[in-house]
Amino acid sequence: MISPSAGRSDFDDGFEDRSERRFEPIGRQQCLDLIGSHHLGRIAWQAADLPQILPITYAMLHGSIYFRTLPDGILAELAQPTSVALEVDELDQQTRTGWSIVLHGHSSAVSEPDELADLWASDSLVPWASANRTLYIRIRPDRVAGRIVRRPT
């Protein structure tokens, strides 16, 4: 007797829509607009011992990405100039559509008093996690690329 699940992958979620989908590139400006319209992403970098990837809440201001962190936490490593990647996406598992963007850039601590005053006054840089997140990190974008998967129109 054959089991009802025979031939199905462990990853098969029963989604029966077989309509064709394809990946299409997203232009630089649209990538930046999408990143700017969201506030949650994953930041990746090569730490001293292993690669790291962590979620952050961020804001895009004046063409750069900013986030707040603990002065003595793991993300504080990014206060020193560091090559980083930020991934932001929006995916719909039901329709198997969405987009994903990766921004490559360099991080550094924000230390200019006028810039810090502007950041402290911003309502868009309130982290989800509590604690003394007083260290502001800036990511200056170098490259950005994205792609979208959707059904043909």
Image: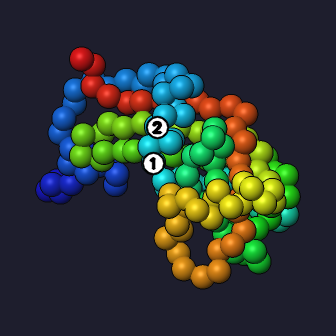
Helix, strand or loop at label 2? It is helix
What residue would you read off at disc 1? 38
Q: Is any part of residue 27 visible from this angle? A: yes
Task: Identify which residue is drawn at 52% across, 22% down.
Answer: 27
Residue 102 picture quarter: top right
Image quarter of residue 103:
top right
Answer with left or right where residue 108 lies relative to residue 63: right
Quadrant, the C terminus: top left
Where residue 112 appears, as percent x and y from the top left, is 81, 56
Placement of 83 over or under 31, stated as above or below: below
Disc 2 + disc 1, Cβ < 8 Å: yes
Q: Is residue 130 left or right of residue 66?
A: left
Q: Residue at x 68, y 61 (%)?
A: 117
Callout 2 environment at 10 Å: few (<14), some (14 to 19), or many (20+)? some
Residue 151 lies, with reference to residue 39, above or below; the image says above
Of the residues shown, which amino acid type is indicated by label 2?
Leu
Q: Quadrant of residue 132?
A: bottom right
Q: Is residue 33 left or right of residue 78?
A: left
Name the residue rendered at 85%, 52% in the picture: 81
**Rounded to the nearest whole Å, what is the CA distance between mark 2 and mark 1?**
7 Å
Task: Identify the element where label 1 is drawn.
Answer: loop
- Is 26 located above or below residue 138 in the figure? above
Marking on residue 34: 2
The image position of residue 116, as x and y in percent, is: 71, 60
Quadrant that contains the N terminus: bottom left
What amino acid is at disc 1? Answer: His
Is 108 on the left-hand or right-hand side of 61? right
